[in-house]
Amino acid sequence: MTKTVEQLHASLINDGDFLSLTRSHEWHMPAFEFEVVGAQYNTKVSVLDTGIIVFEPQTQTTKDVVLSCAVHGNETAPIEICAELIQQAILGNITLSQRVLFLFGNPAAMNIAERFVEENLNRLFSGAHSEDGGLKNKERIRAKDLENAVRDFFESGGSDRDRKHYDLHTAIRESKNDKFAVYPFRHGKPWKTTELSFLKACGVSTILLSHSPTTTFSYFSSNNFGADAFTVELGKVRPFGENDMTQFADAKRTLKALITDEDMQLTPFDEHDFSIFEIDQTINRTKENFVLHFPDDAKNFTDYPVGYLLATDGDIEYHVRTEGEAIIFPNANVALGQRALLTVKPTKL
């Protein structure tokens, strides 16, 4: 039975469980608003659609923060982190002191415990949703809706704000560097060491510098709105209820501190505290007989000797070109034309 707006509202303010509400409305939910009453000030809460919720403290703020997760539906640890923060904010157990937009990207994929239903959502931003056949499936429509939500959120806050977007993921496979972040291409602007100090406080000390535009969610926010944005990988894909949440304690504590103005316990940037990489090769699958030439259980950031055959795409061979070159995000089963492997090499800022 379809719930009325009043029933949705009553359910949410009673238990704060926006995740369950989202999962029971895979593609759409009626919009509604309410206020959380606080000791010092109230917070306006706006449910804009399924998986899209905005908190606006009715006091002076300086930051506009986007926390997104479930862009891939089976990446559950970040979903559980965001669900808990949302619940605590609605129930008044924490008081937000900055504007925050929370996004559960792909509820339908979440419900079937898959990365996506028809198409990889994290390849559909920066307008890619409307190319190559246009808005031909629900994930493309969802990508456009998520773009609009971010655009409206940042623009309604004003141009002189400190804008952040942390797009939280987990990787398909194990990693030699358990947690890492992709820093989107900045078109000549300098990398911000203060942001790297924030990531270190989250338990993330491996950074991958991107040197070209992409269709990822974090690049969309960085390029279009000047946000400090990252794709943050927090461990490995696991089913709901099977995550060891103690592994993400630093990330949850630091994200909570960011939106409540608690002490984030940042330390001055020291390059020796980080493993910094840059992309060397982007290898796309263009043929049906694409093959990766390393074990299926090879971990992210595994390096191979110069000359090692990494992949074949029909008659094209891809070899290791650089000392220390390592694999990341290997997936031989992507759709034709999509990225099947990145290689990265150590670098410095």
Image: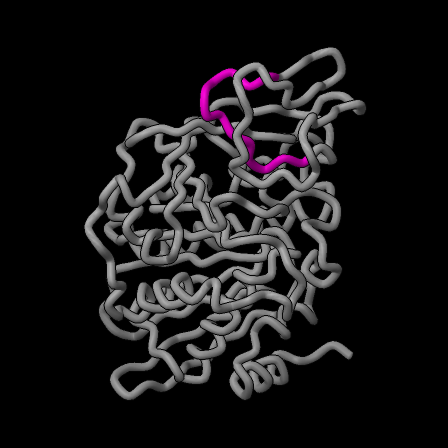
Residue ID at (33%, 81%): 42
Write down the quadrant of residue 44 in the picture: bottom left
Residue ID at (48%, 29%): 344
6 and 150: which is toward the camera: 150
Residue ID at (27%, 40%): 272
Across and down, in percent, residue 107 comes to 65, 61
Q: Furthest-left residue in view?
A: 268
For the N terminus, the image quarter is bottom right
Across and down, in percent, residue 330 comes to 63, 35
Question: Is 167 part of what is drawn in magenta?
Answer: no
Q: Is residue 124 above or below residue 326?
A: below
Residue 49 shows in the view: no
**Drawn side of residue 211 relative to residue 293, left or right:** left
Q: How is the image coloured?
A: one colour
Residue ID at (70%, 38%): 296
**Drawn side of residue 198 relative to residue 69, left or right:** left
Across and down, in percent, residue 304 comes to 55, 26
For the C terminus, the image quarter is top left
Across and down, in percent, residue 346 comes to 39, 29
Q: Is residue 208 above or below residue 15?
A: above
Per the picture, the main secondary structure of the magenta-coloured stretch is loop
Write down the quadrant of residue 249 in the picture: bottom left
Residue range in magenta is: 319-331
